Amino acid sequence: MATALAFAHWVYTGNNDILLWKKAIYWQEELNTDLDHSKEMDSEDKENLALDILRYIQAKEYDKAIKQYELFTRGEIFKLSSRLNNYNLAYAYCLHFAEGQFSVEELEKAGRAFLKRHLKELYLMGRPTEMLYWLKTMCDARDKEYTPEEVIYTFYEFLEDKDKPDFIKELLENSV
């Protein structure tokens, strides 16, 4: 998949190639031309919507992400909270990047709550790319520039201390 190439390029080079992401989005949209937006979303549709929004964010295609969200949710009222599901959290990050809605602190609070509930599960279910989309998006919203390695290490921010290796505990203590 083209988005995997865009993601791998970032991991390997540290360069988030927007043009490559835009091309990846184009091919993703070509695959999604026959989606039925009139039916209720099931859990797979919600996961796919969240990932699509996260991909649009990487491509800086915020208007497309907002349009896709509104098409699928059909006017659902959105409110930022610490109990957001995946596609609503992705939408909140999109609104932050596109329009400056929500502070980094508000997003951190909502993002941390979501990731504490879901990140380890994603990793254990063999979905590390999805896990990295979330971590990268959260790191991109912060005031610090992260290398791919640093983004990967943020995974440990969401684990209990007893589950963290000692060298990670030291890294996290030194980064604060």
Image (cartoon, rainbow, N blue to C red):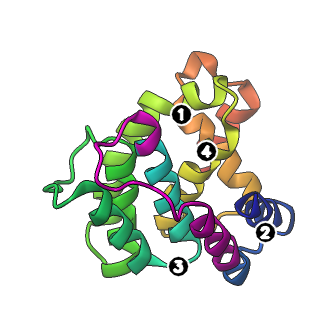
Residue with the mark numbered 1: 119
Residue with the most extreme bottom position = 19
Q: Earlier in the sequence, mark 4 or mark 1?
A: 1
- Classify 160 as above or below 86: above
Give the class, few, some or many, for how many residues have Cα within 10 Å of label 4's Cα (few <14, many ≥20): some
Measure how far apart labels 1 and 2 are at the Cα level: 22 Å
Q: Earlier in the sequence, mark 1 or mark 2?
A: 2
Which numbered dot is residue 60? 3
Give amino acid for label 3: Lys
Magenta stretch containing residue 38, yes or no? Answer: yes
Give amino acid for label 4: Glu
The x and y percentages for residue 101 are 26, 72
Give amino acid for label 1: Leu
Measure how far apart labels 4 and 1 are at the Cα level: 9 Å
Residue with the mark numbered 2: 14
Splitting the image into 4 quarters, where does residue 136 fall? bottom right
Residue with the mark numbered 4: 130
Q: Give the residue displayed 39% in from the left and 80% down from the top.
A: 63
Q: Earlier in the sequence, mark 2 or mark 4?
A: 2
